[in-house]
Amino acid sequence: MSADAESHRLRAARAGIAAWRRWGPYLSERQWGTVREDYSDSGDAWNHLTHDQARSYAYHWGEDGMAGLCDDRQQLCVALALWNGTDPIIKERLFGLTNSEGNHGEDVKEYYFYLDSTPTHSYLKYLYKYPQRAYPYDDLVHTNRARRRDEFEYELLDTGIFNEDRYFDVFVEYAKASPEDLLMQITVCNRGPDAAALHLLPTFWFRNTWTPYGTSPRPVLRRISTGASGNVIRVSHPQLGERFIYSERPAELLFTENETNSERLQGQPNRTPYVKDGINDYIVHGRSEAVNPERFGTKAAVHYTIEVGAGESQVVRLRLCERAPAQIVSSRDRSNEMFATNFDDACNERKQEADEFYASVIPRSLDDDARSIVRQALAGMLWSKQFYYYDIAAWVQERRNFGRQIPRNSQWRHMHNADIISMPDKWEYPWYAAWDLAFHILALTLVDEDFGKQQLDLMLQATYLHPSGQLPAYEWNFGDVNPPVHAWSTIFTYRLEAATRGSGDVDWLERSFHALLLNFTWWVNRKDRDGKNVFEGGFLGLDNIGVFDRSAPLPTGGHLEQADGTAWMALFCQNMLEIAIELTLARPTYIRMCTKFAEHFLWIAASMVTSQDGVGMWDEDDGFFYDVLQLPDGTAQRLKVRSMVGLLPFCAVTVFDGRLVEKYPEVGHALRDFLVSHPELMSAIHDPSSRGQHGRLMASILDETRLRRVLARMLDEREFFSPYGIRSLSRAHLDRPYQFWVGGQEYRVGYLPAESDNGMFGGNSNWRGPIWMPVNGLIIRALIQYYTYYGEDFTVECPTGSGRHMNLYQVAEELARRLAAIFQRDANGRRPVYGGTEKFQTDPHWRDYIQFYEYFHGDNGAGLGASHQTGWTGIIARIMQLFALLPADQLLESGARAVMKEVKERRHEPVAPVAKRI
């Protein structure tokens, strides 16, 4: 195919000509310990179904595996399984700590890397590092459980398991010869000093759809031939039809059933003598009766026993396709025929096409290291897709059938999710979160605009959006409140499509607008307690940086008026206004929606600065925004914690080019009349009728004076401005913790650059001061918006007190440089993301593989939290791409609205890279 082969595949998929996306890395990496599989009375999902039980339990709602691939309904799965001859179990799924086992919450304890993926998954590459000694399951659990919150987590490298490099690098590659012809190549490299044996078990199985209701026919995997050159397994499935698995080398075929081992788990007789962990028992314990001697079942492994010399590699190849053995020309050697030159040719061609595709996506101006970071970030985004199946009505009924209580989500019975969804992390967060997904779109649309658009559409469908208008949060509590960023991501995606294809999908935008109206109304009716245009929301993703758990009743009584909740709503208004303008320019019937959201924004913006009861969120002495605690006796006070809560009002800014007013002057007249009628609003916020650069208008909470004051705090390295981005909590609280007393009890917020010293919100949300990529992305967006309005002459000290003055584009570029520096090698060749972990810093087989963590140490940039949350951390790819392509003069001339078009047109131009120092 041509150099633009992957783009051709994307177009074919969009047109419905070829189902290139049907097969992909849609297998979860952890199905155990999830809410979907929880049938306990207590709702303690982590302990109801553990890692140890998972090998024996046939899941109800999904499947998990390592380096897994499946179809888009997760009917047939393939994944990697391994045994080093010493482990107590075969390695079929990734191990990690549950929430109660880790001193900083749940965490995967394995080393694996998503190295490559095209958007159609025509080529995929994955690396797993498998120790040759017995995996230290008990050591990891017991040592971490004994550690305090102020101690580091005990990691797999700390156990010494990788000493002397006694491990295998196991590379898994998939290539599609055609949409239904899947090639799998496994390369095992022995990094140790001695030859070592490995049991390699590529495993194929069906998701169990026949047991839960007893109405679906049972599919079957059956051996049809075996020989000196390889093996053939027939796949028969009522929906997938018939296809065949070919293995190249001589191997043992092992068959069992994907059925629960009730005898092991409950002490009850099994439905079948062959159960889910049968292959494990055959390999590890030598139980020949555990696998089916007749060579058929619903789960099968191709068992290779290989000896790999020190420093050497061995390759195993398999193929899954619709081509039957009878169709193969050579009757003497049917399976081997499938691995003739066309196998290697197809693999090499897909790899080359992946290189060519990313050469068109990643700017040439970035150096090799930066380009590798961007590519791995995008690979992580694409590997983190997952088939997510959750029918809450059926789940509730199942629990009732077992006589169980309904601990959560009982108000969401309309939900029937069965889709491919972009996940934050397929191990730690193998469930979607609506606001995470909105950030994912920024990176995903770099390579697959159609998928990004479809993901946004999904959350607004009737099987997701609550009838009340609330967007689902996450499966632990769909009714929790996520920040309302869906509209922001929607208008971004629409404009990207308009820039790249010449016009945007107005029908899609209109459909999204109507659903977003429902969500906006839900916020106004549910989270503005007193109708004062100030909002609550609770947790809102900001973990433990507040005085109290904002999702729980306050110890003081009363309620919080949240600076972040109110700022999110101000931005929501701006985004809805942007969408309404686009719709009005195409369909004038929406003109009244423009004035509605303009006026609503002004009310909300003004309420942040002034208040009807005299205590607003803006503190004039500090030049900062704070939450306001409304007490039962009618008094109020600011909770003066300088945190991301107070920076989010800075992010609520949008610049408009004035096209609507030019076409429909009556809109401008209506806005002026409104401002004349409400002069008190203009005393508090930026004047929206004031023209900036090139006649632009700006909606902003902050006027120029307050903007400068907030910037001075944000860019102060003694407060928020870390060498690696904007901290979530001001470092000023290191020496001056905020203290609040109620009922004789002290509530304290002190600066901690990493995990918190308490588990106030619970789960893995135990941090206070780190750098958090999604809100840094919002800050960059805001800086660009302000720059396109104020222009080159508006400068500030950056960093504060340094004497160096920058315009706001340069500030945004400096922030982007600091964020990218988390992952890039510094002057000493070290990557801050890996801190003091020497193996990752110096070993040639480790140092260039990047993990994209949930958040980063506020002082040294080390990765923290979930190690594979490429989800929103993957936006670093968009940030690095943007500043490598978009010069300040072009941005100022074109305006922020034209950013995507400029980037698209300048993709290959060697302009100033993000890594340069200003």
Image (cartoon, grey):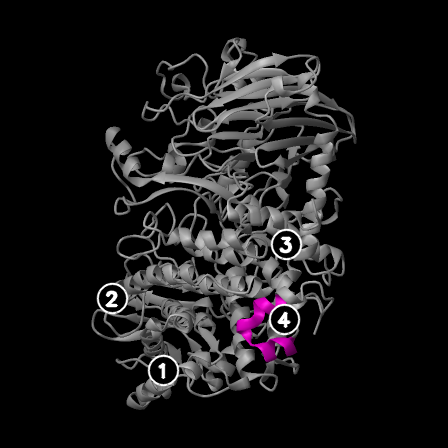
Q: Is residue 206 visible?
A: yes
Tag 3–tag 2 contact (CB < 8 Å): no
Which amino acid is tagged 2? Gly
Q: Which residue is mark 1?
A: 667
Which of discs 1 and 4 lies nearer the camera? The answer is 1
Q: Which residue is mark 4?
A: 813
Q: Which SS does the magenta portion mostly show? A: helix
In the figure, 109 relative to 459: above or below? above
> Residue 506 appears at what percent x and percent y?
43, 63
Which amino acid is tagged 3? Val
> Residue 728 appears at what percent x and percent y?
50, 64
Q: CA distance from mark 3 to mark 2?
A: 42 Å
Mark 1 or mark 2, earlier in chain? 2
Q: CA distance from mark 2 to mark 4?
A: 42 Å
Task: Mark 2: give few (<14), some (14-19) or many (20+) Cα within 10 Å.
Answer: some
Residue 783 forms part of the magenta stretch: no
Residue 902 forms part of the magenta stretch: yes
Question: Helix, strand or loop at disc 2?
Answer: loop
Q: Which residue is mark 3?
A: 833
In the figure, 37 relative to 213: above or below? below
Residue placed most toward the observer, 516 or 155: 516
Tag 2–tag 4 contact (CB < 8 Å): no
Mark 1 or mark 3, earlier in chain? 1
Question: Helix, strand or loop at disc 1?
Answer: helix
Q: CA distance from mark 1 to mark 3?
A: 50 Å
Mark 2 or mark 4, earlier in chain? 2
Quadrant of the image containing the N terminus: top right
Range of residues picked out in magenta: 888-903
Q: Which mark is residue 558?
A: 2
Mark 3 or mark 2, earlier in chain? 2
Which amino acid is tagged 4? Glu
Which of discs 1 and 3 lies nearer the camera? The answer is 1
